Amino acid sequence: MSSFPELGSSSTTPWFSDSPASRAALVLALVLILLATTGWTADRDQRPAPGARATALTAWAQGSIAGRELPGAESSPRVLSAFFRSLSEAQRRLLGDRYPLVVGNLDGAPADLRYRANRTSLERATAVEHERAHDEQLSDLSRLRATHRMERFESMLAPGRQILAFDPTGPGRAAEVFGNLDTARRVSVVVPGVDTHLLTFERNKRPHSAPVGMARALYGAEREAAPQARTAVIAWAGYTSPAGIGVDAAAGRLAEEGAVELGSLVQGLPSSSRVSLFCHSYGSVVCGVAAGSLPSRVTDIAVSGSPGMRVERAGELGGKARIWATLDADDWIEDVPHLEFGELGHGADPFAPAFGARRLSSEGAVGHAGYFVPGTASLENFAKVGVGDLGAVNCSDGSSGCRTAAREQEAV
């Protein structure tokens, strides 16, 4: 604390005023000092170096099909969907085989085509990592990392897996679908938080703390809650998340970038489906930033273990989605100051009554990563929200329906 000698000083001139902003600045400064002394605020560069996908994008930009120029890879999902509908099945497959790292990540391209393209990309990426894992010119650590990536890619290649997105660049991005996305009337998207990348996309230990385990559990719970419903769940790790609990996790830059990617994903989903977002930890910041620009078919946004949604009230989020929140008593996020100062902090606690969210029970969940564990009230509630059985949810106060104290949002 030597960098703040004025604290505890007998000086008659205070170093800060007693305004709310000054008190918030003091709290935030103390939090950052604590994080710095524990080594948590290392500001790691999350922007991956160019790789195979950058090369593929360049080739795509110069490519054509049947004498037609290809649309820009950054085109809207609507434009891309119309383009692929105009092609024959053979032409679509040709593009998928020729540019798998591009086609496999295009929101608006047919889901089956993306699955096929991403399997090709995974096979190629596995071969690359296999070669690196046995390259004696690399360090032991580099070979070990290559082995871990190879094993992750081999797992993603298992029969029956539907990989909706795959980019091995840097820490990597991915998405996986459970269920039939094309016929689903209700689609749920799991939006995870910090330290989400290809190696943490799924976990053998504590599987429900990783996107794949979360989504698989949610899909199973939705099938149990409404066996006849046509549902699909997406494990979405399609944005660059913060590395650890540091400056990036306390700021909104990555959430703003992730919100754009999330909006693109939603816009590329089948137009007949209703969509629910289940946003965990920093993922709730992403969902909060995205909320105001999401289409009206996003009917529900449920956050768990949230550091904030970058607003003070649910009504400030914009959009028409119902907002749900849950927080386990053992979750360490409860002890993080919910404030916003400049570019740091994410605003009010969504689980606080004054925020105006519908407060769900999380009975049975343990800690920050326990909300999607089978048998917990939080997972059962998420499933009921996902299938639209809103009257059956269990609220934090023991009631059902979870009506808010604030002005009721209109039913979607």
Image: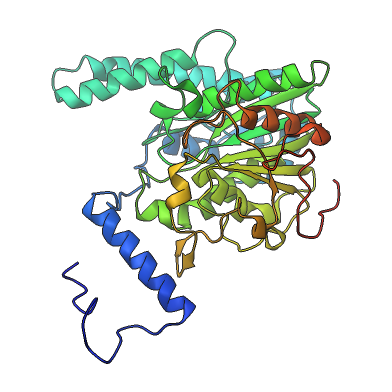
| Residue at the image position 72 percent from the left and 23 percent from the top | 222
Position of the N terminus, as image quadrant, is: bottom left
In-front residue for pair 221/266: 221
In the depicted structure, whether residue 359 falls above or below residue 20: above
State the image coordinates of residue 388 (x, y, percent, origin top left).
81, 33
In the depicted structure, whether residue 265 falls above or below residue 218: below
In-front residue for pair 187/378: 378
On screen, residue 362 versus residue 334, left or right, reads: right
Total marks in image? 0
In the depicted structure, whether residue 122 falls above or below residue 363: above
| Residue at the image position 82 percent from the left and 55 percent from the top | 408
State the image coordinates of residue 292 (x, y, percent, origin top left).
69, 57
The colour scheme is rainbow
Instruction: Kindly indicate the quadrant of the structure image that contains residue 144.
Output: top left
Is residue 72 in view? no
Instruction: Kindly indicate the quadrant of the structure image that contains residue 94.
Output: top right
| Residue at the image position 41 percent from the left and 51 percent from the top | 249
On screen, residue 45 versus residue 206, left or right, reads: left
The extreme bottom residue here reads 12
State the image coordinates of residue 176 (x, y, percent, origin top left).
58, 25
Is residue 173 in view? yes
The extreme right residue here reads 411
State the image coordinates of residue 104 (x, y, percent, origin top left).
57, 28
On screen, residue 210 versus residue 78, left or right, reads: left
In the depicted structure, whether residue 89 falls above or below residue 71: above
On screen, residue 280 versus residue 218, left or right, reads: left
